Image (cartoon, rainbow, N blue to C red):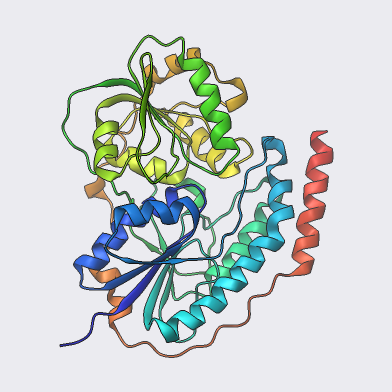
Amino acid sequence: MNKPKNILVAPLNWGLGHATRSIPIIHALLAEGFQVIIGSDGPALQLLQKEFPQLEFLEFFSYKIEYAKNGKRFKWKMLLRSPKVLKAIRQERELLKKLVKNKKIDGVISDNRLGLYHNDIPTVFVTHQLQVLSGSTTRLTSAMHRNYIKRFDECWVPDFSGKTNLSGKLGHPKKFEIPVKYIGALSRLEPVETESHYDIMVLLSGPEPQRTELEELLMHELKHYKGQVLFVRGVIEEQQSITRKEQVKIVNFMETEDLQKAICSSDLIISRSGYTTVMDLYKLGKKAFFIPTPGQTEQEYLAKRLQNKGIIPFKEQENFSLKALSKAKVYSGFKPLLNEGSFNSTGFGELFGLFKSERKFRSHSKVAFNINLFVMGFNNMLDDRETKA
């Protein structure tokens, strides 16, 4: 009898979205008879430890991603942190070499961890951002991202390949030289029939300090709301805590089964417009109201796109008030948006064939941070800042 192959699943710790959308992949790997090892850091690792207590976990190097308190300085903060991100990428690259030898890793599924490619085993990169939107530096950031993606054996995009899709130009650039596989919407949640219990559900996540900024804003605004509110703070802790402030029930976090019941029993979801949240709400067919993270171009794009399509409205964080929620009544929500049966999505069994077949050796060129691209992007940021001033 053949020994099960060890597959490393490693989502980036940037909010909880990369971790939560890895959950259906992990379940599918286990169902196919693979041995799964999970690698991440911070809240993403903690969440997956709660979901899969029986599995082996490895703590990876942190990219140390933080949002700026002022959204207009988001790109500047990311630029200043880029040396630490690049260091973490190099460290996880070296770590993987050791893990392949010591843990007998047979394959890798990396959700946006850029250093987890290898010469001797098949590696997969999961992303919905084939084009990385960053304003005046979009061409630079997209080129740098592609430079890493092409070092993996396959790129899986959690979306549909047709014109009607969820990610828009993020996952469907006009030109993209790297072969990709569209694998359909990834969500750990399933629709369940339940009665309505909450008028509003707040669903928070994401790096600090913006998660706390939005929590404080919504807590203040919801003091004046008369309906029933479930407020999920998105803070992963050892124990779940539940408190109540008048009509607002406050929970620090929810695991999958409780979360899907709570969303299905809520009339309106208030959340960030992160892509994993978009996939979850699509899967459950919900109405929502989005508040994009200030300065996060991807979330701003997704929110504007869905509002323009008449699906979900949004408001900038700095301009949000409870009155803005009235807009949600005239938007369709996700129920009439897509008929999933009309899309082509590859089954996991077929996707996992990459790890079952023999693979020819090929070498990867060394990843280097191009200093000319760095300088060009820095100058573009300066130009962009001066134009807005």
Decide which of 157, 160 is in the foreground and name it.
157
Q: Quadrant of residue 91?
A: bottom right
Note whether 227 is above or below 93 in the view shown.
Answer: above
Q: For this view, does 231 lie left or right of residue 145? A: left
Q: Residue furthest bottom?
A: 361
Q: For this view, does 25 lie left or right of residue 3? A: right
For the point 38% across and 77% down, the residue is 107
Question: x, y percentage for residue 244?
Answer: 37, 21
Question: x, y percentage for residue 78?
Answer: 68, 51
Q: Quadrant of residue 271?
A: top left
Q: Is residue 65 visible?
A: yes
For the C terminus, give its image quadrant: top right
For the point 43% across and 14% down, the residue is 326
For the point 82% across and 46% down, the residue is 383
Q: Quadrant of residue 4?
A: bottom left
Decide which of 263, 145 is in the foreground and name it.
263
Note whether 210 is above or below 268 in the view shown.
Answer: below
Question: x, y percentage for residue 22?
Answer: 36, 57
For the point 53% across and 72% down, the residue is 150
